[in-house]
Image (cartoon, rainbow, N blue to C red):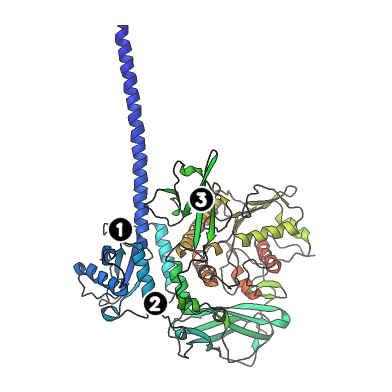
């Protein structure tokens, strides 16, 4: 009996062991299945990089003949390309939009099998004014969204993708598509003209004036399309006064510039052509076509060993990768997985601008010669005389409040002091009033080094604030200032990738601003200040749009749980624009500003308009001097503080 019982126990032990082994195998199979499904999804997303959109392909080309037609088109544009490389995965016609006439050809979407063939085709067509022969009416571009899945059915996209695509298309409509390679046919500031619409002998403070700009090329031929990057400013040197002008593009070579006359005196107006429309077209196209302007590296660590590997947003999905995904916000980052390292062992990441990489053709580089950047357009009038009249701007205006819209121009500068439009800033004659406002405040600064300047300004002028050292590994580490006596905390933390720094940054604490906001309880003492921009200029614009959209959603969640929390948003600063135009041109920042206007519309937040202020101050530095920082901080304090008592 005992032998039988022992045998039964042995058999039971074997069964349990076998069951556990099967369970482990099933678990590993489930994990592998999930990993493969993730790879398939990522690969499908990646393949959209190989897609082309062809327009004006005749409807007479039947669907069975489309592949041959497109292959012939590729061979026509790329004669040296071997026939074996002209492989197409599929060709589709998309539905005709309702606003197009019934006789207009439907767009054709093509997935080219080899990425280098697609890139060569795009580059070659950009160098041509137009295609020749049977293809003279055909134009091409890269689709911005995955319109079809590999099965041929319309691919379902998420709400975030829909929002991002909608904003992208709104911006994309403002950018010209040009293939001009002859520099003489590009916009010329010297040959263009600025007129004053409805001129008068004198004006009153508070009046609005309108200028008309007519653009010409170097052959004195009038331009027939818009897209030139213009910037306008009015100033009175004796008063140290200046403000920005708003540009209105009619997309036909004509522009209006709108100014509000804030002060009295003799005013000089200047309109600059920062880049010709042919240059902005190249900047927009190349920015959205690749990720090659920045290299990323990751450091994987294990006991007594380290390994560096390639990281980025757009790695080859056929390789073995570590996926760092935020599925809710659809934010993605990848690193090539080193052998014998877990994906969890990624500890640090760094990035480097690759200014040696460029997609510009030789003719496109000529658009950005120093003589063609920030060039003043001649005007046919002199100074504008402004007097203080009955309709002058009232000086009895209330302090700026949260909930006002982001607008341009948003104010003016006089004698190094910023005066916002339609409201006033608080003035602090003594630091005691400032300290009283900040008492028991928790101020979170999330952004780049331009917001980091604010923290240093507070540290310099409020001696009770003491730095609390968290880490000492690199310049972009998290910073913390504490005033224990007044229960005041001010912190700065970088926004996560893309954040370009040649020194390694800790990966374990990387979070997007949206995720950081989700971790803050919030109350009437809490202030959140944020900005992003300059580090995104080197990447396709949809990264910037998606990040802003997710920040907007996080702010809305914050206001649901804590409507008393104050949120302040700072826009980018103007920059020197001396070199590296592909990645650092202010044209990219102007697009960012436009997107901010769209995304943060009707939000109960305050805006510190660095884009407007730095243009008015005419600093043209990504890190402006303390004069500008003081006025930016002053705007912040106006939003978060009660007016000081009358003396």
The front one of 369 and 276 is 369
Kindly identify which residue carries mark 1: 149
Residue 55 image-quadrant placement = bottom left
SS category of the residue bearing label 3: strand
Q: Is residue 53 above or below residue 366?
A: above
Alpha carbons under labels 1 and 3: distance apart: 32 Å
The residue pinned by badge 2 equals 127
260 or 463: nearer the viewer: 463
Mark 2 crowd level (few <14, some 14–19, many ≥20, 10 Å Cα): some
Residue at image coords 55%, 71%: 586
Residue 458 in the figure: left or right of residue 358: right
Where is residue 179 drawn, in percent x and y? 40, 78
- Viewer-proximal residue among 339 and 106: 339
Tell whether label 3 touches label 1 (CB within 8 Å).
no
> Whole-Å distance between the Cαs marked 1 and 2?
31 Å
Q: Which residue is mark 3?
A: 298
């Amino acid at each position: 009996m005992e032998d039988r019982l022992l045998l039964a126990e042995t058999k039971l032990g074997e069964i349990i062991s076998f069951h556990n082994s099967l369970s482990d195998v099933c678990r590993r199979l489930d994990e592998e299945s999930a990993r493969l499904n993730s790879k398939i999804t990522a690969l499908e997303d990646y393949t959209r990089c190989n897609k082309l959109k062809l327009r004006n392909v005749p409807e007479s080309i039947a669907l069975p003949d489309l592949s041959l037609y497109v292959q012939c088109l590729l061979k026509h544009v790329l004669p040296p390309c071997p026939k074996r490389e002209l492989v197409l995965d599929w060709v589709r016609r998309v539905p005709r939009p309702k606003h197009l006439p019934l006789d207009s050809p439907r767009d054709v979407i093509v997935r080219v099998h080899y990425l280098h063939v697609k890139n060569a085709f795009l580059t070659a067509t950009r160098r041509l004014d137009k295609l020749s022969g049977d293809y003279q009416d055909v134009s091409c571009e890269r689709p911005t969204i995955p319109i079809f899945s590999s099965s041929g059915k319309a691919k379902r996209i998420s709400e975030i993708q829909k929002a991002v695509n909608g904003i992208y298309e709104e911006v994309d409509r403002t950018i010209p598509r040009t293939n001009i390679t002859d520099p003489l046919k590009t916009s010329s500031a010297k040959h263009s003209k600025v007129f004053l619409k409805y001129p008068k002998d004198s004006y009153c403070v508070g009046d609005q004036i309108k200028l008309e700009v007519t653009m010409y090329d170097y052959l004195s031929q009038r331009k027939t399309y818009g897209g030139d990057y213009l910037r306008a400013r009015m100033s009175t040197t004796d008063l140290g006064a200046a403000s920005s002008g708003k540009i209105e593009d009619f997309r036909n070579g004509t522009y209006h510039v709108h100014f509000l006359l804030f002060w009295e005196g003799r005013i000089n107006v200047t309109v600059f052509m920062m880049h010709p429309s042919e240059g902005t077209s190249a900047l927009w196209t190349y920015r959205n076509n690749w990720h090659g302007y920045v290299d990323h590296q990751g450091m994987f660590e294990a006991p007594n060993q380290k390994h560096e590997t390639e990281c980025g947003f757009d790695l080859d999905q056929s390789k073995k990768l570590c996926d760092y995904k935020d599925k809710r916000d659809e934010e993605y980052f990848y690193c090539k997985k080193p052998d014998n390292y877990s994906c969890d062992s990624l500890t640090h990441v760094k990035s480097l601008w690759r200014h040696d990489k460029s997609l510009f053709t030789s003719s496109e580089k000529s658009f950005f010669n120093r003589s063609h950047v920030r060039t003043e357009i001649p005007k046919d009038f002199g100074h504008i005389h402004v007097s203080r009249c009955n309709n002058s701007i009232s000086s009895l205006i209330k302090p700026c409040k949260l909930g006002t819209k982001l607008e341009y121009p948003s104010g003016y500068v006089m004698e190094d002091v910023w005066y916002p439009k339609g409201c006033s800033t608080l003035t602090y004659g003594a630091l005691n009033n400032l300290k009283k406002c900040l008492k028991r405040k928790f101020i979170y600064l999330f952004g780049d080094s331009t917001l980091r300047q604010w923290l240093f300004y507070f540290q310099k002028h409020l001696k009770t604030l003491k730095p609390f050292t968290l880490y000492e590994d690199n310049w972009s580490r998290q910073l913390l200032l504490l005033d224990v006596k007044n229960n005041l905390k001010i912190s700065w933390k970088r926004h996560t990738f893309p954040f370009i720094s040649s020194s390694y940054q800790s990966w374990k604490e990387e979070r997007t601003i949206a995720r950081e906001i989700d971790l803050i309880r919030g109350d009437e003492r809490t202030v959140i200040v944020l900005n992003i921009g300059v580090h995104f200029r080197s990447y396709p614009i949809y990264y910037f749009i998606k990040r802003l959209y997710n920040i907007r959603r996080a702010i809305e969640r914050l206001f649901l749980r804590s409507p008393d929390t104050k949120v302040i948003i700072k826009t980018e600063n103007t920059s020197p624009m001396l070199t590296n135009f592909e990645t650092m041109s202010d044209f990219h920042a102007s697009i960012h500003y436009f997107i901010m206007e769209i995304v943060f519309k009707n939000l109960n937040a305050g805006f510190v308009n660095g884009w407007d202020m730095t243009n008015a101050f005419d600093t043209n530095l990504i890190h402006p001097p303390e004069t500008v920082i003081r006025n930016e901080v002053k705007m912040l304090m106006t939003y978060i503080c009660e007016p000081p008592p009358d003396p």
